[in-house]
Image (spheres, rainbow, N blue to C red):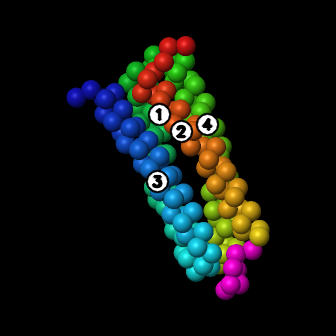
């Protein structure tokens, strides 16, 4: 069995998990937060933080490990412009994800101490920031997948 293809399969699996988890977390967070029910918002915020660490962080480690394995098995990949561009886009996505994690923790903390009636305007602003960062990351992730599948010549 070809080691490169094993790493490639693991890389595709990691990308599927990151992409699917990101969309799934965003969907359920949006649905939960839009209810306005503070108890649902508290629960969904705690679950969002957990899901991001369990699935997203684990998949990122898998992506890094499999990418390293592919580069080890085929070092000439580093010469490909599409790979350099996808690595740069991946760095941008990471730069968007890090603040999202801090925002999630902040939302969870604030909701734990929120009055039993409703979320504060400060929490609502954090939710908007969370979604804007995700909305910026989504097309970048689509572009990364496109680059990795199509491997365009520049």
Badge 3: how crowded within 10 Å, few (<14), some, or many (20+)? some
Q: Which residue is mark 2?
A: 141
Q: Nearer the viewer, mark 4 or mark 2?
A: 2
In the image: residue 45, left or right of residue 14: right
Q: Which residue is mark 4?
A: 91
Q: Quadrant of the N terminus?
A: top left
Which of discs 3 and 4 lies nearer the camera? The answer is: 3
Q: Residue at x 55, y 76 (%)?
A: 40
Precedes in sequence: disc 4 or disc 2: 4
Q: Which residues are magenta?
A: 114-120
Q: Are marks 4 and 2 in contact (CB under 8 Å)?
A: no
Give the quarter of the image for residue 102: bottom right
Which residue is more in the foreground, 138 or 87? 138
Residue ID at (57%, 63%)? 30
Residue at which label 3 appears: 21
Question: Visible in this render: residue 122?
Answer: yes
Q: Is residue 42 visible in the rendered structure shown here?
A: no
Residue 119 in magenta?
Answer: yes
Image disc number at residue 145: 1
Task: Compare marks 3 and 2 and give the one earlier in the sequence.
Answer: 3
> What is the CA distance from the residue labelled 3 to the residue labelled 4?
18 Å
x and y, in percent, of residue 142 in the image: 51, 37
Secondary structure type for disc 2: helix
């Amino acid at each position: 069995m070809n080691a490169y293809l094993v790493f490639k399969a693991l890389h595709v699996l990691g990308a599927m998990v990151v992409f699917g988890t990101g969309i799934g977390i965003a969907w359920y967070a949006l649905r939960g937060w839009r209810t306005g029910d503070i108890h649902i918002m508290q629960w969904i915020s705690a679950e969002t933080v957990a899901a991001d660490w369990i699935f997203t962080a684990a998949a990122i480690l898998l992506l890094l490990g499999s990418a390293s394995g592919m580069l080890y098995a085929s070092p000439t990949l580093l010469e490909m412009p599409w790979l350099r561009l996808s690595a740069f886009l991946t760095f941008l996505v990471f730069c968007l994800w890090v603040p999202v994690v801090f925002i999630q923790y902040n939302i969870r903390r604030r909701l734990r101490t929120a009055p039993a009636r409703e979320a504060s305007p400060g929490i609502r602003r954090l939710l908007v920031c969370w979604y804007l960062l995700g909305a910026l990351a989504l097309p970048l992730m689509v572009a990364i997948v496109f680059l990795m599948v199509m491997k365009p010549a520049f």
